[in-house]
Amino acid sequence: MALLIKNIKRLVQVETLKLKNRAAGKEMAKVEAVEDAFLFIENGKIAAFGAMNQFSDKSYMWETQETEVIDAKGRFVLPSFVDSHTHLVYPASREIEYVDKIKGLSYEEIAKRGGGILNSAKKMQEISEEQLLEDALKRLDEIILYGTGAVEIKSGYGLSFDAELKMLRVIKKLKQLSPLTIKSTFLGAHAVPAAYKGRQGDYVDMVINEMLPQVALEGLADYIDVFCDKGFFTVEDTERILEAGLQYGLQGKIHANELDFSGGVQAGVKYKALSVDHLEYVGDDEIQALLGSQTMPTVLPGAAFFLGMVYAPARKMIDAGLPVAMASDFNPGSSPSGNMQFILSMASIAYKLLPEEGINATTLNTAYAMDLSDKLGTIAVGKTANLYITKEIPSLEYLPYYYGTNKVDTVILNGKVVAKEGRMV
């Protein structure tokens, strides 16, 4: 079965020559496009694209096989969003803590009272694996409808041997059941459990010596992560865990500098982490460490917005020549939304990125942060056909500008239509 999309008003984020694995600095403002275009998909891959006047000369190639045709007149086509940082497997929402935030309690104060991550960890012990899976599948369908085609999901709400493995086994099942491209990250070092208060080193030992070997044995994770920040794990803890992860072939993806200048960015670069994420506190030293590295700086606008925190200096990072990725941080405590259209809007509204920079930040660069930029993130021949067709819109700039509504009409994953007009098909 093949799929032909014709009369596309504008086909955005195309690559025709040498494929980029990421966009950095001034390159982030460049997004190639084809006006009045067609796109042909075969066997789940992008097979051809170009201007409609080129299509007419070659159309006989596609009339001889079973081909579904979509007329996209007045609509844009873009590569699906890649969401490279989420915690969307969780046991329950935490709206009561949200009220505590409204009353003035800080993220750290809530955590010290047994809220935050520890609250989710307690409920994770109680929920069944079946319920956890069912709830997560609903969230995956929700983000598909908003245009996401690939997602990274972390553990970290277990904080015990059994519960961490339960989370990771659920993520493994999600990979099998969902049309989304999914990567799994082991985040045993998300917080220190209450039972290990005052014995943080012992908990790190358990993560390294008990959890990690079993995670590796069952093939449950693609990456390893640590929350390296004030009040959580130290640089020394982080480096121990990253080193242990590398022994099992797990590259790092670090929570860093959300609450303070923690040294997490430098630790991530030192251990060649695929990404360092959050980055509200980034100065010249952090930027210098990232320049010349292969580590992707990843900003999480939803968390900073929801928690009322300072915004990461994304504009400064780009102007310094760095790449920047932006992901949702979908989780129940600090960013209860996986809507990447909103993240694209936040890129411009809060971080002063041009629309083109926002598109690179939420597609190509987030694909890089999941080691998927050879397969996803742009429209290129041979790449996986994960893309979406917009509703009728006037311009590319309209996507971040008209925030708060779903501008996606049709979602295509692995070359198949999986959602249309706001519902799964």
Image (tube, rainbow, N blue to C red):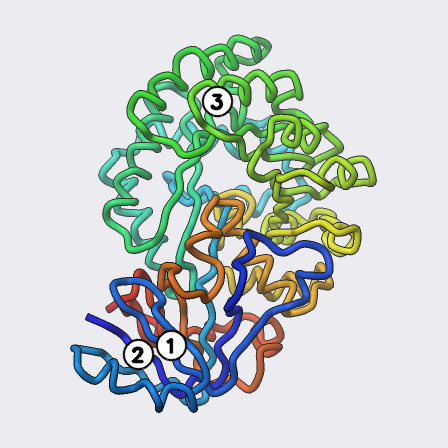
334 in relation to 326, above or below: above
Q: Quadrant of the C terminus?
A: bottom left
Point 36% across, 67% down: residue? 46
Residue type, numbered disc 2: Leu
Point 48% across, 45% down: residue? 370
Residue 335: x percent and y percent?
A: 54, 49
Residue 17: x percent and y percent?
A: 53, 65
> If you read the primary sequence from the N terminus, does the residue marked by circle 3 or circle 2 appear first?
2
Residue underneath mark 1: 39
Residue type, numbered disc 3: Gly
Residue 354: x percent and y percent?
A: 69, 68
**Is disc 3 in contact with disc 2, using a CB cutoff of under 8 Å?**
no
Residue type, numbered disc 1: Leu
Q: Quadrant of residue 72?
A: bottom left
Give the CA distance from mark 3 to mark 2: 44 Å
192 in relation to 50, above or below: above
Residue underneath mark 2: 4
Q: Report whether 346 appears left or right of 19.
A: right
**Is disc 1 in contact with disc 2, using a CB cutoff of under 8 Å?**
yes
Q: Which mark is residue 245?
A: 3
- Mark 3 secondary-structure assignment: helix
> If you read the primary sequence from the N terminus, does the residue marked by circle 1 or circle 3 appear first?
1
Q: Quadrant of the N terminus?
A: bottom left
